[in-house]
Amino acid sequence: MNRKSILTTLLCLLQLTLFAFAAKGAGAVQWDIRLEGDGTASPKIVATATIAPGYHLYSTDNPAGGSNPLVFYFDTTGCQTDGAPVADRAYTKEFDDTFEVDQHFYSGKVVFTQKLKPTAATYSVDVEIKGQACNDTGCTQVYGGKSLTGKSPVAATPQPEAEADKKADDLTKAEAIAETVDSLRDANAPFEPAALTDGDVSKEGWWANVEAELKEFEQDTAEGSESSLLYIFIAGFLGGLIALVTPCVWPMIPMTVSFFLKTNKKSRRKAIGAAATYGASIIVIYVVLGLAISAIFGASALNNLATNAIFNIIFFLLLVVFAISFMGGFELTLPSSWTNKMDSKVDATTGMLSIFFMAFTLVLVSFSCTGPIIGTLLVEAASTSNFVTPAIGMFGFALALALPFTLFAMFPTMLNSMPKSGGWMNTVKVVLGFLELALALKFLSVADLAYGWRILDREVFVSLWIVIFALLGVYLLGKITFPHDDKVERIGVTRFMLACVSLSFAIYMVPGLWGAPLKAISAFAPPTYTQDFSLYEGDVHAVVDDYEEGMRLGKQLGKPVMLDFSGYGCVNCRKMEAAVWTDPEIKATIDEDYVLVTLMVDEKKELPSPIKVTEKDGTRRTLRTYGDKWSYLQRSKFGANAQPFHVLVDNDGQPLAPAFVYKEDIPGYKKFLRQGLDNYQKK
């Protein structure tokens, strides 16, 4: 890769980033809300919307499938609403080619009037208005609100007719909220939360700590944690097995084992002991490296780093560079002075220390092949927010890497059956190059999701993976060759079968372009809500992505709230969504009986203003992003810090069931949801 190519790539990324930060419309609608007729028996609330030039404010009955309709919320004390808000003029009706529905909207200025019926000498109304306004360049969420108080000359006693009217009005409000929820699901768009204050994260009300209540349900949360650690260990072990067949490691197995056997000719027992020490040294080096990374950066810092845009873009470019190197573009090695120094240490020492330095030399020499595998593993471990996961992952990797050296030393005759290095090693290297390209896109996707750039939506990601794995299959069939490849005279059975697997995998992903779930890659691909066109309706989507908004909706609809603490870089979260939530019964229960609120702890969108909070250990911290806020909510209220973390709460924020952590257990999840509903109905 020459400098011109690198510069061109960086300029393209910079240009895409600049496009992503294009400004959206602000101040589209200004609200003036006041109480008229105070002191009379027939007061009314008058809400005047002044709409900016070029914008359309959509009406309260805008059809489903179009833009979000306008919704009024009235929280009354000492009075009742009389009917629904009435506009002072008719809306404009116009067919929208994008949504293929008739849109109902206002422009300029419109006044809404809501009549009230006092039932006490004094009364109060909390008014909240939500909607959407759009112009030719984009859309923005609209908010308005005010608290009003008034007096009535006579404390009226509600008549049976008034009670019936109130019930009908409550039904109308619930239907309006349900319609808003449905429109949000149809649009697959995140709900924009209202302005936040320090009071939003107080220790009272919805933010009150409920760790003791959760413990009463006797939930064994360690099981999910153990599952995550097992997943990281298996991922590390598989990474070690892949590293074994790379050109940097494979040729060293017979060389190293033969060295141990020759230096201990008189005692095979000593040779086996030395080889075992060598393998143990490899494990120790990698585990210490994993622990050191956790100790230096910390689990939460690693998690933040794993979703940092700059870090992910650098890692994306790094993997692309490794892929080009694996494909024969250039040779990538560590400075020879490093390995020379380690070789000199081996020669200058004896015994166990010499064996340790030999293991360290292997780590350095094999870096060009193991580096991208280790890096991917560490980033994956960092996303679990667990201090020991990097060490667990490195232990699995080192165990797989060290195992052959020890086994071949114990059974030296096995060396004769090992395939000799040759052209097949370069084929393995090129295949790894294709895999590096595919994995590189995952890191770019994490940054894209966390910052909301939308440059790598799901259909773009799936398209690129289809191309990569289709080309890999064609390469394995010998139709494409790279600089260091030998001429393919014939295709072996193993190579042919791998080509079939790769081409089949590419074909398997094709329906994903139209929204198919693709459970096999759900852990890597962006969520389905980022897809512009989808024929699939089996996914579960959050109603809102704001905690307070979700709690208010739950109260209005009379439903329990399901909190889904998730993350853009959380692989296990995507696996749960694809493997568990897509079950028809579970999907129906979540959609119909709960208000689902998804809170991304790595969301990088900034809060309207920073919020200062006090952690449990007394330290003061400033929450600057929505991800900071949701992470703090999970820690302060539920005493947890790992994702996925699902908890069911009532309308007061109290838990209804034990928290459900990562586990692909459909029967267990159904029981979890049923328990929450049963306890909610009892309350």
Image (cartoon, rainbow, N blue to C red):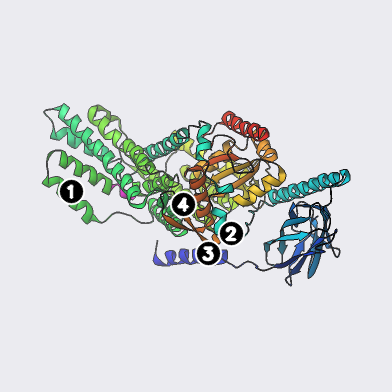
Image quarter for residue 38? bottom right
The residue labelled by disc 3 is: 17
**What residue span does the magenta drawing correspond to?**
365-369
Q: Is the magenta region chiefly helix, strand or loop? A: helix
CA gap, disc 2 and disc 3: 28 Å
Task: Please state, as top left, top right, bottom left or bottom right, where the C terminus lies in the image.
Answer: top right
Type of amino acid at the residue the image marks with label 2: Leu
Alpha-carbon distance for marks 2 and 4?
A: 36 Å
Label 1 vs label 2, nearer the camera: 2
The CA distance from mark 1 to mark 3 is 45 Å
Residue at image coords 61%, 44% = 510
N-terminal-most mark, 4 or 1:
1
- Is 254 in front, or is 150? 150
Q: Residue 157 at what x, y percent from top left?
A: 84, 48
- Residue, x 53% and y 48% (percent of image)? 465
Q: Which mark is residue 343?
A: 1
